[in-house]
């Protein structure tokens, strides 16, 4: 048994039972890596750690530290260093009689619990979790159905060109010979007054325009559209047949605001077209705005438009109940009545959609002699894609042939076939597949990991040819999948989750204290943060450390003015360094700082908890007692730091706040809306503290960059990032892929200079091969 | 106008449609076996049927006034209902302002109010936009929907027959409010889906549940023992749904769902079949009390149907411009209008044959059908003598008569429809045309 030396430092005394203050978000690898797997032997001491635990601790903590109802309910899990555990035990355990377990006994019992169940890694080793059967999560379902019905086998190339292709006519009805202008317009936002778009060539009284191209949706959700015009206009989005907004008839001469909502899946482009005409109306103007999920209304910006054409995508609109995310990531390991009903209705919705456009999907014609055969083949194809593997004869019979033989009309046969396919466990549970393991399963898992969707044609072919066996083969495909916008959408969703951006919608600030900080501004901040994340993640280096260390922000004019920065000329967002202000990547992004702050003042506690959990990779227990921060109960001359220190000063609070507060105080240079400040209430800002690092060593941190330096150098924090990313991508516990899986992934992450893209490829490969990827 | 989007369907709505939840109760109560005994007051229904381009006055309007009158050739198909019809001559659409006669004839027909200025140019006059007010059918629908005893699932149903796929003041006569035209549904299969889609969905769903259960059993062996519980839970959810669907069947077995001829293409040449299908759906929708107000719009104002099945190759609108002296054209126009009248007669007959569910008499006794047109006469484009032929006992008018008015504004007639269902409006549409109050002589 390796010996360790306890430096008899005094740490904040733990109250009552061994609460240990900190639960593991991630585990400590360094110490546990070289300890024996077996229980520690009691070599010389009278009793082994195991025996002491059984005698003195198990009554309250449970035989395996799992907790005991009405005593110590919380399991004895955490990520304190073993030295700290020993100190706490020495000082405070057993409750009421701490003198009964001291010195070497305390060390022995600390060592025992540490290695047996205290750390996540110990638990992984001793009770390894398994890969559980899972249904498709909601995003996986929606993406899979979209790709199931998509006829394009090539993924969309966004290209370099932005804006929409535009045609201007000197006639109210798009007459070819009257076409006067062909160009690309960056956005649709025109006010011609009483004039025409082009004097001399186009008359003032009547003209028409057409804009065409594609629209890119970054995020999944409901998109609202608004067409503003006093003239005639129609808007089509993702449906060439039916206009989303039909405002062809101008009526009353006023500018009308015509609105409609459409659900779109992030990471995809959709066809868009606007037809417009003016005839004898006094004035002419048109504006096309949207409100993407979590954002404010804006003219659809150039960066979301391209003149390129794409086919439309089927988007299921049935509302699903949210997936279980109680373990910190969404997963599909349970079914409920509400989910089953939603899946049933989504299948009906999809089947009806298919039948309505059947001949287009099946490439058949109503009076085609061959139609029955074509429809059957369409259904075979659909089943094959949905089940992610070739069909057996039996499957063909059940899912397609039987349906055709039992119904009077072809449409009805297709409808039943689609209903059956989409409700089959073979579609809903991607892990279900004939034994033994084959390349189709590898393709399935790879597409799920990076796209939340079905394998594409290239992957299906590779599986058919048996080319998904080695880590090298799978890695190549993973790299290809990663370059698709669908993967980017999935990665973006991870960062939203990591940075808790869904809370950002709740931000409200004191309008008098922070004039200009309105919904539109918050929307700008969100765009700025997303651009920053894209810049870091999709750069070639893709360096995780840049997420925390970058000293620049993306700002538009409005943001630049607010934060006192200089922008180059030109609309839109620019990358601007803010090196004089202690900026440190996402930690000091104004959106994050504003999110973790009060209405008027900062909140070092919210910021500190965020940094502890998400950046440092340490998780916290809920506070032992709920204490509300009430501004009014403090002397007004106090600084926020002084107030928080006073509020959390008790020993009980300090178990956690000794970690939370130094991190939170480090950001005190940034006010409630993320502006730099050097004083508060006339007192200089004090952002410096001693932060107890994961190894127990105190580290002096004096500001955001110190925290960032500490985080990027901490293998604990790095592993926390790797683990969170793994869970988001794979939706299974990382330890199910081997007790040393996380360490291995971390090692390769380190070797790659913390390249996030390479880590994603590696995670996807591990998931696809069920852990058999070579290091 | 953004079209009515049901893009995100609520789960409860699905459940209701499939008859799977307590939310289905109001619907179930509306069904013949369960609910009709509950309604005390008699039902009142209004159907407005539209055909375009004016009529041929000499062979349309009866020569006599009062109870003793003979039906002219165009109205001959209504002979079986002669004692249950009213012809109203001398009603004028007096709405002026923007828009040509066809536009105003159509979009002011049921609204009785001017069009907004706009960008749609007709064959004459100034360009115009949409009507600036609600139409009478929607006004009455709202009145019914506000009251528990007359509230129905849809309130109103807007049927069309071969209506062109464009939205402008010539193709819309129903308005939910100013600038809010309501599009008729002219595809019977779409209308069927609207009325009975969930019934079909349910049947399809039920038909695959056995296969699905079998499939779940088959894959059980492919997962580990630890994971099997998840599939078992899934199976029990399917069983539960199967039972719920069967229970819903028990409740809904009395619903009358019409059999539609399959594969009829929505185009000009199929107009006779399409008309019959739409009328059958309309009657079935009313029988199931899904609505108490309906419109049935044949083509559109300026509609150019080619009635080849009557051996007429020219378009209806083109013919309507021919002078009175062109006998051949007048004969053709007579045939065309007689065909429209036959559609009206079919609708009346279907309603007459159907006993009022849970009530007295036939459905026709409790329904008023109004046949109207955007013009009095095609070649003059007059908005005087707008055809109004009323059939049925729904609004309590004294039927079996030919009435004549002296250029009475049609607003007064629209007002009369509202009053007859108990909705005593002071004015409707442009108040300037309502000064003489509700049209007299109807009751």
Image: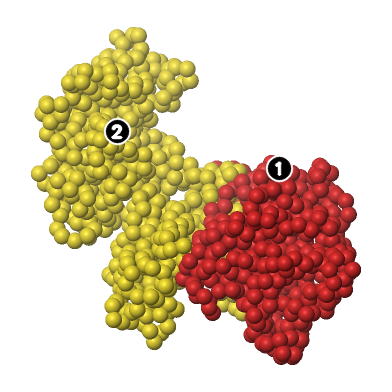
Return the residue nearer the eye: A44 or A554.
A554
In this image, A464 relative to A157: left or right?
right
Residues flagged by tags 1 and 2 on a common chain: no
The image quadrant where one finds the C terminus of chain A is bottom left
As drawn, the chain in red is B
Q: Is residue B163 visible?
A: no
Which numbered dot is residue A599?
A: 2
Q: Is residue B188 left or right of residue A422?
A: right
**Residue A333, percent from left and from top:** 51, 44
Above or below, A630 relative to A31: above
List the residue tagged with mark 1.
B148
- In which quadrant of the rendered image does the N terminus of chain A lie? top left
* Marks 1 and 2, how far apart at CA: 47 Å
Q: Residue at x 27, y 23 (%)?
A: A631
Chain containing mark 2? A
Tell me whether circle 1 and circle 2 mark residues in contact (CB < 8 Å): no
């Amino acid at each position: 048994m390796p010996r360790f030396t306890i430096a008899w430092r005094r740490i904040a005394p733990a109250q009552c039972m061994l609460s240990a203050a900190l639960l593991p978000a991630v585990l400590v690898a360094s110490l546990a890596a070289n300890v024996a797997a077996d229980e520690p032997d009691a070599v010389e001491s009278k009793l082994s750690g195991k025996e002491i635990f059984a005698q003195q601790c198990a009554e309250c903590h449970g035989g395996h530290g799992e907790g005991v109802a009405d005593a110590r309910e919380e399991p004895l899990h955490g990520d304190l260093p073993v030295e700290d555990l020993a100190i706490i035990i020495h000082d405070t355990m057993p409750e009421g009689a701490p003198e009964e377990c001291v010195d070497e006994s305390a060390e022995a019992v600390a060592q025992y619990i540490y290695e047996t169940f205290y750390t996540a890694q110990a638990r992984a080793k001793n009770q390894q979790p398994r890969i559980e059967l899972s249904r498709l999560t909601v995003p996986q379902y929606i993406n899979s159905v979209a790709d199931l019905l998509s006829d394009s086998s090539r993924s969309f190339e966004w290209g370099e060109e932005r804006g929409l292709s535009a045609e201007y006519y000197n006639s109210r009805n798009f007459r070819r010979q009257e076409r006067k202008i062909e160009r690309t317009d960056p956005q649709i936002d025109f006010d011609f007054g009483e004039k025409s778009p082009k004097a001399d060539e186009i008359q003032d009284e009547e003209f028409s325009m057409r804009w065409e191209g594609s629209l890119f949706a970054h995020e999944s959700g409901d998109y609202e559209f608004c067409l503003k015009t006093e003239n005639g206009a129609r808007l089509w989005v993702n449906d060439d047949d039916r206009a989303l907004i039909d405002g062809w008839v101008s009526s009353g001469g006023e500018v009308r605001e015509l609105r409609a909502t459409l659900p779109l899946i992030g990471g995809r482009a959709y066809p868009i077209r606007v037809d417009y005409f003016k005839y004898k109306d006094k004035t002419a103007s048109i504006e096309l705005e949207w409100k993407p999920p979590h954002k404010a209304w804006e003219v659809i910006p150039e960066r979301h438009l391209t003149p390129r054409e794409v086919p439309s995508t089927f988007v299921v609109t049935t509302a699903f109940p949210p997936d279980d995310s109680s373990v910190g990531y969404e997963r599909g390991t349970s079914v409920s009545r509400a989910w089953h009903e939603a899946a049933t209705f989504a299948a009906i919705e999809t089947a009806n959609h298919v039948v309505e456009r059947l001949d287009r999907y099946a490439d058949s014609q109503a009076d085609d002699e061959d139609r029955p055969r074509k429809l059957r083949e369409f259904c075979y194809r659909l089943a094959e894609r949905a089940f992610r593997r070739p069909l057996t004869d039996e499957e063909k019979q059940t899912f397609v042939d039987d349906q055709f033989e039992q119904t009077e009309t072809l449409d009805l046969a297709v409808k039943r076939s689609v209903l059956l396919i989409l409700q089959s466990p073979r579609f809903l549970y991607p892990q279900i597949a004939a034994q033994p393991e084959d390349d189709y399963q590898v393709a399935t898992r790879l597409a799920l990991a990076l796209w939340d969707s079905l394998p594409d044609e290239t992957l299906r072919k590779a599986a058919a040819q048996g080319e998904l066996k080695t880590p090298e083969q799978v890695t190549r495909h993973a790299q290809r999948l990663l370059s698709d916008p669908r993967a980017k959408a999935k990665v973006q969703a991870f960062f939203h989750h990591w940075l808790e951006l869904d809370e950002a919608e709740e931000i409200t600030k004191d309008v008098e204290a922070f004039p200009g900080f309105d919904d539109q501004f918050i929307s700008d901040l969100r765009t700025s943060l997303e651009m920053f994340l894209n810049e870091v993640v999709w750069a070639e280096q893709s360096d995780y450390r840049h997420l925390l260390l970058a000293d620049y922000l993306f700002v538009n004019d409005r943001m630049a003015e607010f934060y006192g920065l200089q922008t180059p000329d030109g609309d839109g967002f620019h990358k601007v360094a803010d090196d004089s202000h202690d900026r440190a990547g996402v930690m000091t992004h104004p959106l994050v700082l504003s999110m973790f702050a009060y209405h008027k003042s900062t909140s070092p506690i919210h910021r500190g908890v965020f940094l502890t959990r998400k950046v440092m990779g340490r998780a916290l227990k809920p506070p032992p007692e709920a204490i509300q921060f009430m501004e009014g109960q403090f002397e007004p001359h106090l600084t926020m730091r002084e107030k928080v220190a006073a509020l959390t000063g008790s020993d009980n609070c300090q178990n956690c706040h000794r970690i939370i507060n130094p991190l939170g105080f480090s950001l005190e240079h940034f006010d409630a809306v993320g502006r730099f400040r050097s004083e508060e209430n006339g007192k200089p800002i004090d952002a410096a503290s001693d932060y107890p690092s994961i190894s127990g060593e105190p580290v002096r941190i004096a500001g955001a960059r110190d925290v960032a330096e500490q985080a990027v150098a901490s293998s604990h924090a790095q592993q926390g990032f790797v683990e969170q990313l793994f869970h988001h991508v794979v939706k299974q516990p990382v330890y199910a892929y081997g007790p040393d899986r996380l360490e291995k992934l971390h090692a390769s992450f380190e070797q790659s200079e913390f390249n996030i893209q390479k880590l994603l490829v590696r995670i996807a490969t591990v998931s696809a091969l069920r852990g058999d990827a070579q290091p | 106008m953004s079209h009515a989007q049901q893009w995100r369907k609520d789960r409860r709505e699905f459940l209701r449609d499939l008859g799977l939840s307590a939310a289905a109760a109001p619907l179930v109560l509306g069904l013949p076996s369960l609910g009709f005994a509950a309604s005390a007051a008699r039902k009142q229904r209004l159907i407005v049927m539209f055909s375009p381009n004016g009529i041929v006055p000499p062979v349309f309007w009866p020569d006599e006034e009062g109870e003793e009158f003979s039906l002219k050739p165009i109205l001959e198909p209504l002979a079986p209902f002669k004692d249950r019809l009213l012809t109203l001559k001398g009603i004028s659409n007096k709405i002026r302002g923007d828009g040509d006669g066809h536009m105003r004839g159509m979009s002011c027909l049921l609204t009785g109010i001017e069009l907004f200025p706009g960008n749609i140019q007709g064959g004459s006059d100034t360009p115009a936009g949409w009507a600036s007010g609600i139409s009478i059918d929607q006004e009455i629908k709202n009145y019914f929907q506000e009251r528990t005893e007359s509230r129905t699932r849809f309130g109103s149903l807007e049927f069309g027959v071969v209506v062109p796929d464009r939205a402008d003041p010539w193709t819309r006569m129903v308005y939910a409010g100013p600038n809010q035209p309501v599009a008729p549904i002219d595809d019977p299969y779409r209308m069927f889906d609207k009325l009975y889609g969930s019934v079909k969905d349910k049947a399809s769903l039920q038909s695959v549940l056995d296969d699905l259960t079998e499939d779940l059993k088959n894959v059980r062996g492919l997962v580990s023992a630890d994971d099997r519980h998840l599939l078992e839970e899934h199976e029990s959810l399917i069983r539960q749904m199967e039972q719920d669907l069967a229970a819903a069947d028990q409740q809904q077995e009395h619903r009358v769902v019409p059999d539609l001829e399959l594969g009829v293409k929505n185009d000009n040449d199929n107009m006779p079949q399409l008309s019959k299908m739409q009328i059958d759906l309309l009657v079935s929708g009313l029988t199931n009390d899904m609505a108490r107000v309906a419109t049935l719009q044949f083509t559109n104002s300026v509609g150019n149907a080619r009635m080849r099945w009557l051996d007429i190759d020219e378009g209806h609108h083109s013919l309507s411009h021919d002078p009175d002296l062109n006998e051949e054209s007048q004969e053709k126009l007579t045939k065309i209008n007689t065909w429209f009248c036959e559609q009206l007669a079919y609708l009346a007959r279907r309603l007459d044959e159907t006993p009022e569910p849970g009530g007295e008499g036939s459905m026709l006794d409790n329904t008023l059908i109004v046949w109207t047109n955007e013009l009095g006469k095609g070649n003059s484009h007059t908005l005087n003598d707008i055809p109004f032929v009323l059939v049925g006992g729904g609004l309590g008018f004294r039927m079996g008569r030919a009435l004549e008015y002296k250029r009475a504004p049609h607003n007064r007639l629209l007002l009369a429809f509202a009053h007859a269902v108990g909705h005593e409006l002071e004015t409707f549409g442009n108040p300037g045309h309502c000064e003489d109050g509700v049209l007299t002589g109807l009751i």
